[in-house]
Image (cartoon, rainbow, N blue to C red):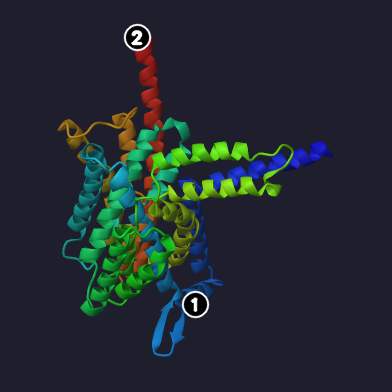
Amino acid sequence: MAKRKFRSLKNWYVIRRRSSNFLGSQWGGGAFLVLFSIIALVLANLEVTKHAYHHLLETELGVHINNFRLAMTFEQWVNDALMAVFFFVVGLEIKREIIAGELSTVKHAMLPVAAAVGGMVVPAVIYIWINAGTEFSGGWGIPMATDIAFAIGILSLLGKKVPISLKIFLTALAIVDDLGAILVIAIFYTSTIDFLMLGAGLAVLCLMFWMNWRGIKPSLIYLVPGILVWYFFLNSGVYSTIAGVLAAMAIPTKPRFTKKYFLYKTKYFLEEFRFTDKKGIEVLSNPEQLEVLNKVHYVANGTISPSQKLEHILNPWVMFLVMPVFAFTNAGVELDSFADLHVLGTTQGMGIFLGLVLGKPVGIFLFCWLTIKSKLAVLPDHTTWNMLLGVACLGGIGFTMSIFIDNLAFAGTEWVDTGKIAVLIASVTAAVFGALVINLMVKKDHVTHLNANDA
């Protein structure tokens, strides 16, 4: 009986640990994106479900209180509200990397910044070259983006074959890439602006920065102003997702307590915990020890910055809810359009496909080579040029951000769906090709290393 109970507890622990690892992994989020994309494609193309699927996307949801009314379709809520949360987390990641991460010093930032610039410029040039003077010319921003969840997910699947420094490099590259995509959206894909609403949004944003400056730490206090910034931006004509990034910049990055204070206090609390210990009595019946543990919790919680807390809390929600729902809402295109227009045979499809699959790796690798040869940066630790080439190929996975820009570039036209199909095909191709190249290059480097040792 005892053995069975122990086995059950052990199995429960293993399941819980694996679930926790899955929910905390980038590849898990990528798997969910693929799953929900497939579900959307199936629902949008089966006769028995396609009408229900499109009816769901067009269903209007909202609130109406006296003269205040906020109503949008389900698809609009996903693209304009849920994606604002996604961009908020992206903003937190960008801020973290700039303050204390791979972008905190010029030396560390130079290589991922150069790679991201190359990975944006070359695909855009290829797309413009193919689509110059056509009705598709406005979609040049689509192949500029890299999907961090997919790219890191594919890299993680290769396990210990890939050095951790290369994963850090790809993460930093994708974050800079996201920043570039955000600037492109803000500058080139914003049309009519209501300056009164924009001014109101900026005023609330200034209030949030003032709160940060005054040292107001609790994250919840920033919730209402953040929602107001989103609402004003939504009605200003500037895409509300930009509000998510700007609001993230106002969240404090300094914790209430320093590391030195935490170490000092926890050492003191540990002694107090030992002093109040009563043999044979658990914490459950020992109020003195419970009070000490609450003090430890308070100090530990205060040593984590508000921005870090929010990033930690929101990341699983973004990975396993926001992005899959976005994929479910936007990947459901009818494949009849593929048969009618031969997507990759059009300048639009070819521009997106070649921009992502060819332009991204060429741009990333070329700009890395130029930066390193100019001695402005060095290769990441334990990384070879062959490995860097494989990672550059993974940069062609556009998906989330590319589909988002496709919605903006071709809004209200039949080209939205064909653009999405091209993005899906290009992203899958880049994922498979990138994984194969990395696997091949890692094996090649391993063989070269063994031969060098034998010699």
Quarter of the image holding residue 409? bottom left
Task: Give percent across and percent down for residue 302.
Answer: 44, 50
- Position in image of residue 193 (x %, y %): 22, 76
Amino acid of disc 2: Ala
Q: Is residue 154 above or below residue 162?
A: below
Task: Report crowding for label 2: few under 14, some 14 to 19, many 20 or more residues within 10 A (C-alpha).
Answer: few
Report the Cα–Cα distance between label 1 and label 2: 68 Å
* Quarter of the image that includes the N terminus: top right
Would residue 267 be found to the left or right of residue 181 on screen?
right
Q: Which one is earlier in the sequence, the residue at label 1 or at label 2?
A: 1
Q: Is residue 399 above or below residue 20?
A: below
Q: Residue at x 54, y 44 (%)?
A: 21
Q: Quadrant of residue 332?
A: bottom left
Res 146 seen here: no
Identify residue for label 1: 55
In this view, the residue farthest toward the top is 455
Dot label at residue 243: none
Residue 344 image point, x, y percent? 32, 57
The three-letter code of the residue at mark 1 reads His
Rendered position, 294 above or below 102? below
Which quarter shows the C terminus?
top left
Of residue 163 and residue 40, the one placed in the foreground of this image is 163
Q: Secondary structure at mark 1?
A: helix
Q: Which mark is residue 455?
A: 2
Give the secondary structure at mark 2. Answer: loop
Asked if residue 6 shows in the view, the reply is yes
Task: State left or right for residue 50 relative to residue 368.
Answer: right
**Residue at horizontal 32 percent and vertical 74 percent from the top:** 234
